[in-house]
Image: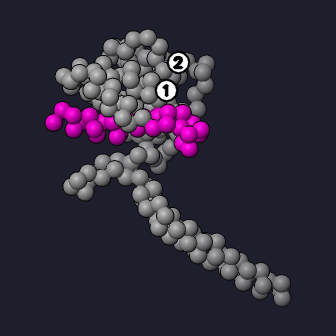
Amino acid sequence: MKDIKPAILLFIMFTIICGGIYPALVTGIAHALFPDQAKGSLIIDKAGKELGSNLIGQPFSAPQYLWPRPSVTAEFGYNPSASGGSNSGQTNPDYLKTVAERVKTLRESGMTGLIPTELAQASASGLDPHLSPQAARLQAARIAKARGIPETAVQKLINENTAGPQLGILGAARVNVLAVNLKLDTLTR
């Protein structure tokens, strides 16, 4: 019985420390040092309306917008509460049919040449907010035609919104789809 009391006290103490004090401290430090990231890296317009996050992809299917990587999250695409891939393998007939349909849609939109895999296959998380610069540039002609603007203006916007590898060495160059699409709307207004 004398061993139970210290065990219970340690349990309560570590629950308070690890479940309350430590998370509150880390959250406070995160909000102090990285306020935008700690709040979800939200994109907010001048009127204060939340438009989305730099960290989570959003669905765009209209021809005047940059199309993101496909999402297969549950219930609806780009659902952050149901992040995950389809778990379908490369030999799954349903998966192959889905990829073929996506490629067909891209071809029908006017895309020629090699289709980057990121435009035909969903990611593991289903939430990718970025495309490679190559995948973004392949869509410039369609976007320009739909908006009635020069393709060079779209290419310039994509180039301006291309971020290099993190710290210069981690990952690859990337283009944030939501950021480009928001700026595209300012081009034609």
| Residue at the outermost left position | 189
Q: Is residue 139 above or below residue 39?
A: above
Which is more N-terminal, label 2 or label 1? 2
Label number found at residue 96:
2
Q: Quadrant of residue 135?
A: top left
Q: Quadrant of the N terminus?
A: bottom right
Range of magenta residues: 163-189
| Residue at the outermost top position | 113
Q: How is the image coloured?
A: one colour
Residue in front for this viewpoint, 18 or 40: 40
Q: CA distance from mark 1 to mark 2?
A: 14 Å
> Could you tell me residue 77's position as x and y percent?
41, 37
* Residue 14 sits inside the magenta stretch: no
Q: Quadrant of the C terminus?
A: top left
Q: Residue placed at 55% from the left, 72% from the top?
A: 25
Q: Quadrant of residue 85?
A: top right
Label number found at residue 118:
1
Q: Is residue 19 above or below residue 49?
A: below
| Residue at the outermost front position | 168
> Could you tell me residue 57's position as x and y percent?
41, 40
> Could you tell me residue 75's position as x and y percent?
42, 40
